[in-house]
Image: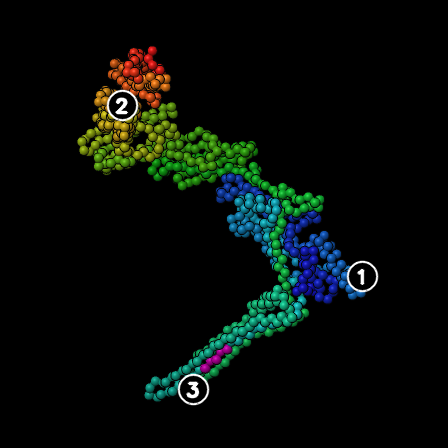
Amino acid sequence: MLMWDKPEVVEGLTVYRDHEDRTLYYVLPSVPGFRIDDNGLPVFKFIKYRFPIDRPDGKKGGGFLIADVEFSVPEDKLAKVKEALQERLDEQARNLGQQTPASPVKFGQLSFLRGTASITVLDDGGSLVEKVINPAAPSLYGKMITPFTAELSAEGATLLEQALQGKGAIVQVAYDLWMPVRLPPVKARIWFKAEKFMEFHQEIDVEENFWSEDDYREKISEKFSQREAGGVQIDPGGVVDQKVIGAVRDWALRNWEDRLAKMVLGDIPPVDRDASKWYTEHDFENISRDVISSRVSSFDIKYEEGSIMEWNPSPRGSLPNITTLTGRDGQPFKWEDFSLTVDLDDPFFRQLRVTTRANADFDKLPLNSVEVKIEYKQGAEHSIKEFDLRSPDDLGKFASFIANDSYKYKYSYQVNYKGEAQAYQSPEIESDEENLTINVGDIGILLVDVAPGDLNFNQVSEAQVTLQYEDRDNGVDLIEDVFKLDKDHSEHRFSRVIFKPRKNPYRYRVNYFMKENGKEFKSDWQSGVADKLFINDPFSASRTVSVRGFGDFAARIDSIFVDLVYRDEENNYGQSQSVALSQAVNFFDWTFPVITETGGQVTYSANIRFKDGTFEEVPTTVSDRNTIMLGDVALTQSIQLVPDLINFDLVKLVKVTLHYADEANGIDETKDFLFKKGAQEAKWEFTYKDKSKQVYEWRASYFMVDGSVKNIEPGNTSEKTIVLPETPA
C-alpha cells in the first residue's frame, strides 16, 4: 500500500513508494488531459450551429463542446520515471555492497474506492454556457475517463471557438478520488456521546367528605434533560508535516460526521398523566408515581499507525487547447479537423406557416362570414385548406412543407353579407406573407367612421359633411352621404356594401356654420383612405408667407415698410399684417390661419426709404409664391488712385476730383482726394444701376513747390485704376 505521506517528484510526476516492497512504486498523474484514441487523435469535437431566422423564440443558434478527459500517465513519461527510479535503486545497492543491477522497478495499480469529476467551462449555467453534462463519477479503473458535453448559447459558441484556439487553456477539470492508504505514525480518535434523561413524579391526594364535595389535589413534576459531546482528536506523534496532519484530520472529521449522521437517538415518550382510574376504579385515595427513563448512544473509535484510511489527492487542472497538442507525426493538430459549423435551415424541413384573420367588426357591420381558401402547390407539395372566419378573433392556421425553396402560395376569399343574397368572391391572389389579414376594405364594404378632431362646438354650431365614393372602373357608381356633426351628434358611421374591394380613396368636404356671426365657411374637397375620419376646426390649416429684404442696409437702404393682405373671397375671410424691415431685422415670416390651404390670395405693397431721405414705392402686387423679395439692388464700382509716380520734390500737393452721374436713375456722386509726400493709394467707390453706364469723369490739380498750379483737364474714363503722372504734361 502506497506511503501517501512521503511523496517524491520524478520527471515532473508525483511518485509514492509501497510501505513493504521497496521496488514497488505508484505514479500519480499530475494533471488531466484530453483522451487520446488508438489513432493518436484527441477525442474532441466542437460544433457551432444556427437556427433558421424565423424561429419563434428568437434564438439564433448555439454550440456544443464534446470531449473525453482522462487521468493517466503517458507511456513515454512512465518509461522515463522507471529509468530514473531504477538508477536510484542501483545506486542504493552499490552503496550497500549488494549485487547490481538491483531488482527491477515495478509500478502498482492505483485503487480508488470512489470518485467524482467536475468540468468548468466559462460561466457554467450563465449566458454563455447553458449547461455542462457529465456523469459526475469517472471510471475508477484504467485511465479514469470522464466524458462531458457543454451546451453553449450563440454568443458562448462564438467566444469559445476563439478561446479554444491558440495558446492557453479554457476548460478546467477537477477530480476528487478517494483511495485506501495506510495511516502514517499519527493517532486519531473520534468519539461522540448523546444522552437523554426524563424524570416524572405525580402525587394524588383525595379526601372524601360526607356532607360536602370531595377534595381532590394533584401535583405533577416532570424534568427532561439532554447532553451531547464529541470531537476529533489527532496525536501527530513525530509527524511534523502539516499537510499530512491536515489530511488525517479531514479524514477523521468526515468519518466522525458520517457516523454521527447514522446515529438516531429518539425522544423519550411522555408519561401518561391520567391517573384518575386509580381513584375511580380502584378507590385509591393517596397515589404517588415516579418514572425515570434515559437513553444513551455513543461511539469511541481510535485509529493508529497502519490503520486503513481514505485519502483524496484532489488532482485538478486546465486542459490545454488542442491546437497546442501534436500528433504522432509531430505536427500540431488543426482546429478545422475537430470543429464543425452546421446550418440547421435544412430545405427538407422548411415549412410555410400562414395565419389568417379578418380585420372587421362583425357585430356592427352587415358581415356574416369570410371564407378564406389557401393553396400551396410547388413541386411534389400540394396543400389546400379553407377557413370560416366569423369574428375578428377567429384565426386560420395553414401549414405545409415547402418545395423548390418557394414560399409563395395562392389564396382567395368569399364574403357573405347579412341580408344579402349576393356574395363577393375575390380573385385568386399570390402572396408570401406569413400573416394574411383580410381588411374591411378587401371585403366589399365601404366603412368610414367620422368623428370630430379639434372641432370646437363652442364656436361651430354644426359641420355639414359631404362624403362621396365611386369606382366606375369596377362597377361602383357614385355613392354620396350628407350628414351633420354637432354637439349632440358628434359621430357618424358611413357604411355601404359595394360588393367590391375598396380601391379608390373617398373624398369629402365640410361646410362650417359659426355660432357667433352665423357665417358659413366651406372647405376644399379633400381625399382620405383611413377607416377613421376626423373633422378638424375650419381654421386648423395655416399658411406661411416669408418676406425677405435685400440690398445694402448698411449704406443705402434705411428701411422697407411692407403691407400684407390675405383674402378668401369664397368664404368672405381675410387677414392683414404690416411690418418694417431694417438692417437689424431684414426678414419676417407671417403665419396665419386659413380655411383651405389652396384657396385665397396674398397681395403686398411696400415703401423703400433710403438713407439719403428718398423713397421708392412698390405698388400692390399679387404674390404667386410664399416668399416675397423686397429691396434695392445697388451696384458699386471701385476706382484705385495710385500716386507712386508723383515727384514730390517738385510737387507740394495734388488734388484729384472724381465724378459719376446717371440722371435717368437719379445718381450724382462727386469726391475729392488730396495727395502729398508720403501719401498711400486711395480708393473711390460709386453706385450705379445701369451696367452700360460705368464711365466717370476725373481731373487733377498739381500745386508746385515754386507756387505755380498745373492742371489735368477733365476727362471721361472707365478704367479701374488711375496712375497719377509725375507732373501734368
The front one of 515 and 666 is: 666
One can see residue 143 in this view = no
Q: Amino acid at mark 2?
A: Arg
- C-alpha span from label 3 to label 1: 97 Å
Give the secondary structure at mark 3: strand
Q: Is residue 343 above or below residue 134?
A: above
Residue under pointer 3? 286
Give the residue type at disc 1.
Thr
Instruction: Please tell me how many numbered marks the rendered image carries.
Output: 3
Q: CA distance from mark 2 to mark 3?
A: 137 Å
Residue at the spot of label 1:
100
> Residue furthest toward the left?
517
- Please state the extent of the stretch shown in magenta in the rendering: 197-201
Q: Position of residue 683 (x, y in %)?
A: 33, 21
Q: For mark 1, does the 10 Å Cα neighbourhood hold few (<14), some (14 to 19), or many (20 or more) residues? A: few
Q: Earlier in the sequence, mark 2 or mark 3?
A: 3
**If the image is split into quadrants, where does the C terminus sit?**
top left
Q: Looking at the image, which residue is at 39% across and 37% down?
A: 359
The foreground one among 238 and 455 is 238
Quadrant of residue 473 within the rendered picture:
top left
In the image, 368 versus 621, the foreground residue is: 621
Mark whose residue sits in front, 1 or 2: 2
Relative placement, left or right, of 434 versus 633 is right
| Magenta region includes residue 550 | no
Name the residue tied to disc 2. 556
Marks 1 and 2, how far apart at CA: 126 Å
